Image (cartoon, rainbow, N blue to C red):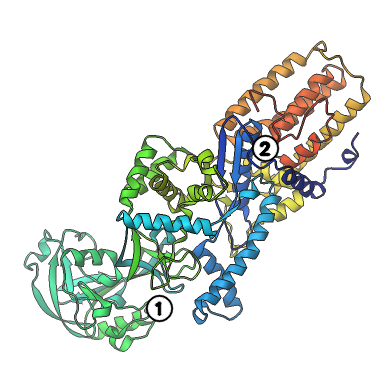
Amino acid sequence: MDKRLLKPYDPKATEDRIYKRWEKSGWFEPKTGKKPFCIIMPPTNANGSLHAGHALVLTIEDIMTRYKRMRGYKTLWLPGLDHAGFETQVVYEKELEKQGRSRFKMKPEDLYKEIWDFTENNKKNIREQTKKMGASCDWSREKYTLDKDIVKIVYETFEKLKKDGLIYKGKKIVNWCPKHQTSLSDLETTDVEQTDKFYYLKYGPFTIATARPETKFGDKYVVVHPDDKRYKNFKHGQKINLEWINGPVAATVIKDKIIDMDFGTGAMTITPWHDSIDFDLAQRHDLEKPARNATHSVAGGEQIIDFQGRLLAIAGEFKGMKILEARPLIIEKLKSKGLVVKIEENYKHIVKKCYKCGTMIEPQIKEQWFVRMKPLAEPAIKAIKSDKIKFIPERFKKISLHWLNNIIDWNISRQIVWGIKIPDDPAGDVFDTWFSSGQWPFAALMSGKKNDFKTFYPTSVMETAGEIIFFWVCRMIMFGLYKTGKIPFENVYLHGLVLDAHGKKMSKSRNNVINPLNITDKYGTDALRIGLIVGNTPGTPLALDENKIKGYKNFANKIWNASRFMLAQNENSKSEARNPKLLKNDKKYLGDFKKLKKEITKNMDSFKFYIAAEKIYHYFWHVFCDKIIEESKKNNVSKIVLFKIFSECLILLHPFMPFITEEIWSMLPPKDVGGGVGGGAGPKGNI
């Protein structure tokens, strides 16, 4: 018996050795095969360490890859890393804050260099952590979103969009984060329900209602619905002189059907610089642009709040004050003028906040680059409706179509240092990171080894988190069709969030973040991998309980002990005839196992890995170990049948638990097996 089996299974002494052997053998590179199979790894953000969500991604994708490789496909799993623009800069800004430094006091080139060095170190760590998870990706093809050849492709797409009239630069309302001093797309904001005071204010003969009186200094238009009988005596365009926050105002009545007559008083003033609805309304009616401040004014109004979140000179004595400091003082002044009708104390409404820092988004007008999305969305909608792309679970098809059908133009400018600089942009802005990562599947293959794009595009599967279906998946479909004329992938597998054992979202503030490498160090990588899969249906959250992982560590020990018994039996018994007579239970056990293999193959082909893993787990423990091995001790199962089922169980288990199965496979007698367990040694027809 192999000396390794004389000791308990030790993942720490096994996993690194096996992975190095795999790498050295070149086994992860795509070999000749009957059909190509390709996954482009979602590029890991190069700004930290792997978390539990990464562990799930790597496990699912490795299961797919190993399974297809064992089935004889020409298999490529291409690894990658993402510079992750805004997210990485936010992470690094936190590091600067700890050091008492600020990026606003640094030269842009110095900040860029520091973040570059920071991500280079992280890339090395992430690469090694990915290997710890057993990821059988082809490291010779690794790509990074800041690779020169990737950047070249991104620029080519930008120029093509410009040439085709699908990119424009214009002054529009954007989501502005005063803390990070950058614009954000709608997808980079979070809608939060908040309780505030709701102020009813006297505006001449009208009563208006607002939660943000600090934006009202420059309001000179009052808008009502043309069918609202309460305001039938007022004519569109009528001028009204009234007293307002800082003195007399000549206001104009505007009638527009956009007004909701049932909300508030049915009358509202507009602040076009700080509200997208107001901006559109002002443009539609071609309202007058204030002449006194041409730089900071638009049709119907001017800028009230600066880009740091402080009031401008138009606010009079409140100039320079932060919004929340000024609000109660503004209300006191309005009260002193008799302009406060009433205050509603508990007004619940939805506000937008920065998804990274939680700062209240301040809508601002700023010149930015925008992509016209509807022309890009139309081919994507057609492809999805015609089922050229399969969504797993299927409900994400409807979700994607709803978003694509209601898509708006996309602001791709970011006022940060870290990222791919927008060509010929005097402001020095960089692309939204999703603009480059949206091109990831074709860019990674076009910039890769010769013939990779021709061989592997469209890719087979895109596996990622359901929460970024709009951020990334839909954009990859749009860009893929636009740039290549083909869908970027045939299947989209969307997993859910990994939660803590109590079903709570992991966060540093809750102190419940699970480091997957701590788990693998404690229980072994195989135990974590199968623990992440069993019971994990696609698209649903997974509560990661350490006790569950501990249970699968026990399962790994069960496999090890069964292997010790099997190899001891092999050494202590005489060889059976090449074609032995089947014993009493042989036919039944072989028949049942053949049925199991077919079921598991069907499960694997239909992406039901959680079912396949559970089936082989229960079979090995409760049928093979508890029944077949026990029957073999009574000489009721032939040794060849016993070894056949055992060796093929290792093959079925391998995609889920690659390390222990490979270690045991290497100990089996050469006459019983051939090659590595993951190297295609499985029987033809099934796994």
Badge nearest the viewer, 2 or 1 = 2
Query: Of the residues shown, which amino acid type is indicated by label 1?
Result: Gln
Farthest-out residue, top: 581
Q: Residues within 10 Å of mark 2 (few under 14, many from 20)?
A: many
Residue 359 visible in rendering: yes
Residue 609 or residue 226, whichever sits in front: 609
| Sequence-earlier tag: 2 or 1 | 1
Against 93, residue 33 (above or below) is: above
Q: Which residue is located at x 72 percent, y 55 percent? A: 518
Image coordinates for residue 484, horizontal then vertical, percent: 42, 45
Horizontal side of residue 590 vs 341, given as left or right: right
Against 599, residue 327 (above or below) is: below
Quarter of the rendering occupied by the C terminus? top right
Image coordinates for residue 666, horizontal then vertical, percent: 81, 36
Q: Quadrant of residue 115?
A: bottom right
Against 599, residue 415 (above or below) is: below
Residue at disc 2, secondary structure: loop
Residue 230 or residue 517, whichever sits in front: 517
Residue 460 visible in rendering: no
Image coordinates for residue 445, horizontal then vertical, percent: 53, 47
Horizontal side of residue 344 vs 660, given as left or right: left
Residue 381 or residue 400, whichever sits in front: 381
Farthest-out residue, front: 450
Image coordinates for residue 379, horizontal then vertical, percent: 34, 43
Q: Which residue is located at x 38 percent, y 47 percent? A: 482
Query: Of the residues shown, which amino acid type is indicated by label 2?
Result: Pro
Q: Which residue is located at x 38 percent, y 69 percent? A: 425
Q: Which mark is residue 204?
A: none
Residue at disc 1, secondary structure: loop
Which residue in the structure is indicated by mark 2? 655
Q: Which mark is residue 308?
A: 1
